[in-house]
Amino acid sequence: MSDIITKTISFVQQTLENAEGGHDWFHIERVWKNAKLISTKEACDLELVELAALLHDIADSKFHGGDEEIGPKTAAAWLRSQNYPQERADRITSIIRAISFKGGKNEHKDHSIEFKVVQDADRLDAIGAIGIARTFNYGGFKNRPLYNPEIPANLNLSKEEYKNNPGPTINHFYEKLLLLKDLMNTATGRRIAQERHEFMETFLSQFFQEWNGEK
Ligand code: ADP
Ligand code: NI
């Protein structure tokens, strides 16, 4: 493994030591692995993909008072401290800026293949069994109800509403998780997303049957 990758792994592990369970080092490790897998079928710069995957949640605005620049800034400062070439560092911070879902309202765009690979890798970790676990963990972290039949999901949330949504955790499936399979960029991402999507549908169907005492 190249020196910059090894050092970045240690930096991320240390920085995320006390992170919420769905945004901790193991989330980063899974995204990094997904990204490497997707990369095998795409013509892309693997080092940029790996560094962007490793640094993509280094400082998530959700956990930093909504500051959306803190992530890209922290990543840029780290790469600068390692004398990493500026032009390549800029490509990495552009990926980090553009990656977050924000209810589909992120105004930053990046059209590089490296971005597409890392975004798919991050999205895969938001769905399937792991996605379900992460979502309820985040809901618990925010002290939200699991479900409330009187509070419907809202598919037209503004970016601000999406970020501050106090709704029940089940709504997040309809506001984000179930939308992701149709937003995948790569063939590999789409294939894996399809299977994970079906697993979430099975989960939701069982959840509602149990909720209603039907099973
Ligand atoms: P965003 O959706 O703002 O881009 P992330 O991509 O960091 O944020 O979200 C990662 C994961 O955090 C989601 O897939 C989900 O598991 C959890 N999460 C984020 N927002 C919520 C929410 N409002 N309710 C439940 N889980 C959430
Ligand atoms: Ni992430």
Image (spheres, rainbow, N blue to C red):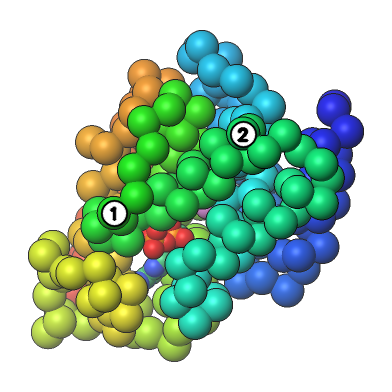
Kindly indicate the quadrant of the structure image that contains residue 181: top left
174 or 211, which lies in front?
174
90 or 55, which lies in front?
90
The x and y percentages for residue 79 are 74, 47
Separation (CA) of disc 1 from disc 2? 22 Å
Q: Residue at x 76, y 38 (%)?
A: 84
Of mark 1 and mark 2, the one earlier in the sequence is 2
Q: Look at the numbered disc 2 and say if its residue's Cβ is closer than 8 Å to ligand 2.
A: no
Residue type, numbered disc 2: Glu
Point out which mark residue 36 bears: none
The x and y percentages for residue 83 are 81, 41
**Where 181 falls versus 160 (above or below)?**
above
Q: Residue at x 44, y 88 (%)?
A: 143
Q: Residue at x 27, y 37 (%)?
A: 183
Q: On the image, numbered disc 1 is attached to which residue?
A: 107
The x and y percentages for residue 144 are 38, 84
Point out which mark residue 87 bears: 2
- Residue 201 visible (yes or no): no
Quadrant assignment for the C terminus: bottom left
Mark 2: secondary structure: helix
Mark 2 burial class by Cα count in 10 Å: few <14, some 14-19, many 20+:
few
**Where 89 falls versus 190 (above or below)?**
below
Mark 1 burial class by Cα count in 10 Å: few <14, some 14-19, many 20+:
few
Residue type, numbered disc 1: Glu
Left or right for 109, reference 32: left
Mark 1: secondary structure: loop
